[in-house]
Amino acid sequence: MRHWIVVPAAGSGRRFGGGVPKQYLELGGRPVIVHALERLLRSDPAGLVVVLAPGDEHWPRLTGRDDPRILTAVGGVERVDSVRAGLALLAGRAAPEDPVLVHDAVRPCVALDDIRALLAAADHPGGAVLAVPVADTLKRVDDSGRVAATEPRAGLWAAQTPQLCRYGVLVAALAAAGAGDASITDEAAALEAAGHRPQVVPGRRDNIKVTWPADLALAAAILAAQEGA
Ligand code: CTP
Ligand code: MG
């Protein structure tokens, strides 16, 4: 079964800060996004759309973007808008029943085994999502920085990417989610809002998202450990 991949890479990394968006920072000698693309391409997709910020100056200067399967689209205000733009580029290429993986450009440590495990769940009608059980005790904190409550952790999982869904189902779910909706932070949320119940596929804990500056050193250590394994 052929599959497609959409990689949202149009964010500006407000939490990370700094001048260069985090997806273009160096990590073990190559930019964060190049690690993600290399790993995704190893799953042998029919095509991969990278969704870029309008006027992105870094992408054209990147080495490691010349694979003929790579296409580019221009993203929007929120992640959901960028994913929608990436899917729109696949219209006429992807069939409604083709599985599509959506993967954050800023998760450079994703393992091929996890991508394959997710693809193996492609038959689930409501899509599938890599996730890990939440390990820490969860505190709800008020505006003054004091603990207001301890949230029960049982049954809570942290969703990662890639997330997978049939092209037609995902396009319909994202069309129903409004433009600029910041509350739809992943594909599963759009699918849930459309009444679907995505399947959870347990993932590796080292598939971290580079969100804060400290995550970059963590990702470098993970890549080094993976490459030495
Ligand atoms: N993303 C995107 N379009 C947006 C916002 C985010 O394509 N309008 C992408 C990011 O580039 C990233 C992924 O979605 O690859 C996950 O988002 P996140 O980690 O939140 O990145 P940023 O939005 O860039 O960071 P922040 O929320 O701290 O500003
Ligand atoms: Mg964001």
Image: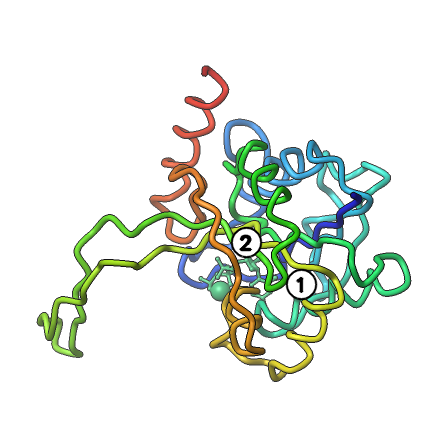
Label 2 beta carbon within 8 A of ligand 1: yes
**In the depicted structure, whether residue 194 falls above or below residue 29:** below
Which kind of residue does numbered mark 2 sit on?
A: Pro
**In the depicted structure, whether residue 36 falls above or below residue 97:** above
Secondary structure type for disc 1: loop
CA neighbours of label 2 inside 10 A, class few (<14), some (14 to 19), many (20+): some
Give the residue drawn at x 34%, y 44%: 214
Which kind of residue does numbered mark 1 sit on?
A: Ala
Q: How is the image coloured?
A: rainbow
Which corner quadrant of the image does residue 225 belong to? top left
Residue 122 at x, y percent in the picture: 65, 50
Between 141 and 52, the residue placed more toward the observer is 141
Residue corresponding to mark 2: 21
Give the residue drawn at x 23%, y 58%: 154
Side of 148 relative to 9 (left or right): left
Residue corresponding to mark 1: 53
Could you say which disc has been placed on residue 5 in the image? Answer: none
Mark 2 or mark 1: name the one nearer the start of the chain: 2
Between 112 and 28, the residue placed more toward the observer is 112
Secondary structure type for disc 2: loop
Residue occupying the far top of the picture: 228
Between 16 and 84, the residue placed more toward the observer is 84
> Which image quadrant: the N terminus?
top right
Side of 24 relative to 169 (left or right): left
Residue 116 at x, y percent in the picture: 61, 37
Residue 146 at x, y percent in the picture: 9, 72
Q: Tags 2 and 1 in contact by the CB under 8 Å rule?
A: yes
Which corner quadrant of the image does residue 36 belong to? top right
Q: How many marks?
A: 2
Using the numbered discs, state the Cα–Cα distance from disc 2 to disc 1 in whole angstroms: 10 Å
Label 1 beta carbon within 8 A of ligand 1: yes
CA neighbours of label 1 inside 10 A, class few (<14), some (14 to 19), many (20+): some
